Amino acid sequence: MTDSSDHPNIHPSQPRSDPSEYKVGYGKPPRHAQFRKGTTGCPTGRPKRPVGISIKEILDGDQRGKNGEVISRREAYVIAIVNEALRGNQKAFSKFMKLMHRSSLMRREESKNPTVVHVPTRTMTHEELEDWKLHNFGPPND
């Protein structure tokens, strides 16, 4: 086989000549229709992705609040989530709770007015169990 450097008139994208043992068929086009190794059919290629703005850059910026006060965008984001959660948006509430948990701001406090009453558990006697079954399910059908 000849190299394109031997023949100055042959462009590198032009294929080499066919060897006699090469069989043309499905998935094997003739050598004259192929590109040379290392050469692509689209030399300009796919365009580069435009340089974007990172999320960190967005969140590190400042923003004016409704009253004209300058706050960070992070604060504005949290305020927006809290406001949506207070309006009853379940997804916003879930996001807020995850944010609180991740930032280690969750804390447990004892309630002054508990809404859940804890009843101590005890085991039933056999007679109490039979009485409960009779009261809830009626007499057995024998």
Image: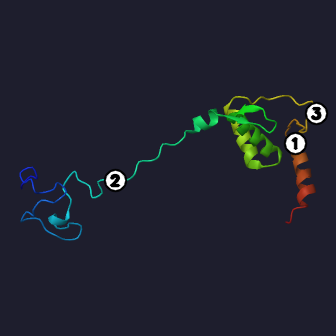
Q: Nearer the viewer, residue 135 or 18?
A: 18
Label 2 neighbour load within 10 Å: few <14, some 14-19, many 20+: few
Question: Which residue is under mark 2?
Answer: 45
On the image, which quarter does residue 133 sit in? Answer: bottom right
Residue under the point 75% across and 42% down: 80
Nearest the eye: 5 or 33: 5
In the rendered view, would you say 74 is above or below 50?
A: above
Q: What element carries label 3?
A: loop
Q: Specify whether 6 is left or right of 81.
A: left
Q: Distance between the residues labelled 2 and 3?
A: 68 Å
Which quarter of the figure has residue 64?
top right
Measured Cα–Cα span from mark 3 to mark 1: 34 Å
From the top left corner, tell me how far across and down residue 12 is, in percent: 17, 54
Q: What residue do we see at 76% from left, 44% from top? A: 93
**Mark 3: amino acid:** Asn
Disc 3 crowd, CA 10 A, few/some/many (<14, 14-19, 20+): few
For label 1, count other residues whose C-alpha is less than 10 Å away and answer few (under 14), some (14-19) or many (20+): few
Q: In this view, does 89 lie above or below 120?
A: below
Labels 2 & 3 near each other (Cβ < 8 A): no
Q: Which residue is drawn at 24% across and 67% down?
A: 27
Q: Name the residue under label 3.
A: 113
